[in-house]
Amino acid sequence: MTERALPLVMGVVNVTPDSFSDGGRWFDAEAAIAHGVELVAQGADLVDVGGESTRPGAARVEPEEELRRVVPVIRELAGRGIRVSVDTMRAATAAAAVEAGAEIINDVSAGLADEAMAEIAAATGARYVAMHWRGHSDRMDALAEYADVAREVRDELSARVDALVAAGVAADRLILDPGLGFAKRGEQNWELLARLDELQALGFPVLVGASRKRFLGAMLPEGAPVEERDLPTAVVSALSAEAGAWAVRVHDVVATRRALDVVGAWQSGRRG
Ligand code: PMM
């Protein structure tokens, strides 16, 4: 049995007033910074700072407002030695975030939302998460049509890799993400998770972002609070570890850390 490294835990810091998953509780630089520090204390390996909600149906945030939200938070967290990614689809925000200390650009559109992104990603030399995306949140539910979801997500991401590399992004800086919930219905998310190996076959690290998403809420009793999605999220983290994911992006770091501790103990049992 081969020993595999456990995935990194990426803790979510949303600096937004309208995120579905934490109700905008961290819409304030100081609160966001404190939350990022707390997530690291709980065992996050890096924190993902975003200033624009991508919840289904969400409207876009003005570029200046997005910058105003994320840059001070990133500067402070990175200044404290915390590894930071910036969750943005905008090249200008990505550039400012890297200048402020972010080491990863997490672009849920894989460069499709802003044609300047690939060039900026190349120029910064930052690592770059290319997530599978078909369109903005106000219309993504209508775009969830696939004959074979795992094959199409892999092929569409592979095309993005080609475009990014052609624009100068080094292949060894790339991380891929199946984009759970983005133009995907419940059963399509499960199929993508079950067939994660097909995405990994492209040869890049894979990030899994299932945390608190609708398809997990659908397993719970009607009206269950969003925090109840943290247990199913942690189980997805454990299974993602077994599937060889590079990182998991989660809101509740404690639960995922515990789940990964269990996976680690199980794996060490295999070694005897
Ligand atoms: N999901 C959300 C936001 N950013 N980034 C990546 N790479 N993968 C994801 O699945 C993803 C993401 C959804 O919004 P949230 O921040 O409210 O969870």
Image (cartoon, rainbow, N blue to C red):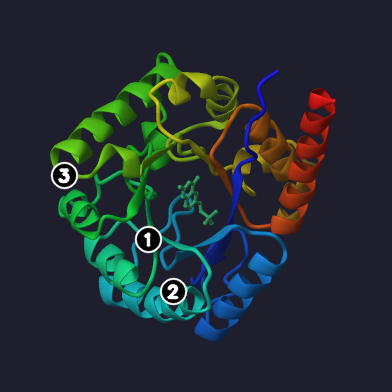
Upstream in sequence: badge 1 or badge 3: 1
Using the image, tell me which numbered label, if any, was put on residue 168: 3
Image location (x, y in percent) of residue 87: 41, 59
Q: Callout 3 environment at 10 Å: few (<14), some (14 to 19), or many (20+)? A: some
Q: Nearer the viewer, residue 4 or 59?
A: 4
Give the amino acid at mark 1: Ala
Q: Nearer the viewer, residue 15 or 1?
A: 1
Give the amino acid at mark 3: Gly
Residue 112 is left or right of residue 32, and the answer is left
Task: Tell me if residue 49 comes above or below residue 194 in the rendering.
Answer: below
In the rendered image, which quarter contains the N terminus? top right
Give the amino acid at mark 2: Ile
Image location (x, y in percent) of residue 177: 44, 38
Q: Residue at x 60, y 26 (%)?
A: 190
Q: Callout 2 environment at 10 Å: few (<14), some (14 to 19), or many (20+)? A: many
Q: Which residue is disc 2 drawn over?
A: 74
Q: Callout 1 environment at 10 Å: few (<14), some (14 to 19), or many (20+)? A: some
Residue 198 is left or right of residue 61, and the answer is right
Q: Ligand 1: does it lie within 8 Å of the C-beta at label 3?
A: no
Q: What SS does tag 2 mark?
A: helix
Task: Tell me if residue 152 comes above or below residue 179 in the rendering.
Answer: above
Query: Label 1 to label 2, Cα distance in Å?
Result: 23 Å
Name of the residue lying farthest toward the bottom:
30
Image location (x, y in percent) of residue 136: 33, 48
Task: Tell me if residue 91 comes above or below residue 149 in the rendering.
Answer: below
Q: Which residue is disc 1 drawn over?
A: 59
Instruction: Evaluate if marks 2 and 3 touch, with contact meaning CB atoms under 8 Å apart.
Output: no
Upstream in sequence: badge 1 or badge 2: 1
Upstream in sequence: badge 2 or badge 3: 2
Residue 11 image-quadrant placement: bottom right
